[in-house]
Amino acid sequence: MELADDLNAWAAAVRMLKAGMRPPVVHLATGLPKSRLRNLYQEIHGQSAPRGRVPENAARQIKNMAQAIEAMLFVRVYLNTAMDRLASENGLDSNLVMDAYRIYARTVAGDTLDVSLAWFLARDLRDGVIQIRRCQQCNSEYLHEPQSPFLRTCPLCRMRSH
Ligand SMILES: [Zn+2]
């Protein structure tokens, strides 16, 4: 790795860790060593990172309809802010994820999505694991992932019908 790339990766890692992203996710995002990321997390937060596995896809981290809607809100902010730059960045740039997350967190009133989930959403969208669909009934966009009970159909219509 070139020195400048290395510095950029560490700068991005600090930004993600400060926002509360878990070290294993920052490792996926930056390729930096896990042990050094864990130490850095501890330095930044004054306590060690929460233990336990982070599910390695976005759909499995979405546990209810409200989160499915939040996830779509984040994705919309992300695509709107990142659109032009994504094509030249292999479809995923962690700095763009962080920019979008900051805007999302500022504009959303309720409980915000976890920042680690935001990164997985951007990645799974790039990989086509999650897709954006438009609801035939209410014309809203929603995130679609056939295995997830919360992403199978439009969450807005499902909330309305209950
Ligand atoms: Zn709908």
Image: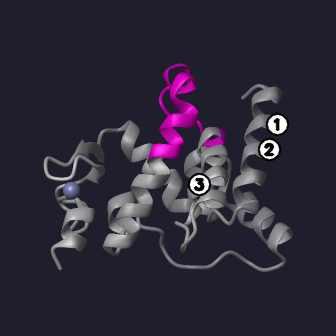
Taking the view exactly as shown, the residue that stands out farthest to the top is 88
Q: Is residue 134 magenta?
A: no
* Nearer to us in this view, 1 or 147: 147
Look at mark 1 in the image and give the residue it sits on: 7
State which mark lies toward you, 3 or 2: 3
Task: Please provide percent x and percent y for residue 162.
Answer: 17, 80
Prevailing secondary structure class for the magenta stretch in the rendered image: helix
User: Could you tell me which quadrant the N terminus lies in?
Assistant: top right
Look at mark 2 in the image and give the residue it sits on: 11
Give the mark, 3 or 1, whose residue is nearer the N terminus: 1
* Nearer to us in this view, 125 or 54: 125
Amino acid type of the residue that numbered disc 1 sits on in the rendered structure: Leu
Residue visible at 55% across and 61% down in the picture:
116
Q: Is residue 126 left or right of residue 4?
A: left
Q: Is residue 86 left or right of residue 72?
A: right
Query: Alpha-carbon neighbours of circle 1 within 10 Å: few (<14), some, or many (≥20)?
Result: few
In which quadrant of the rendered view does residue 156 lie?
bottom left
State which mark lies toward you, 3 or 1: 3
Whether the residues at callouts 3 and 2 have beta carbons within 8 Å, the answer is no
Look at mark 3 in the image and give the residue it sits on: 104
Whether the residues at callouts 3 and 1 have beta carbons within 8 Å, the answer is no
Amino acid type of the residue that numbered disc 3 sits on in the rendered structure: Tyr
Amino acid type of the residue that numbered disc 2 sits on in the rendered structure: Ala
Q: Is mark 2 within 8 Å of ligand 1?
A: no
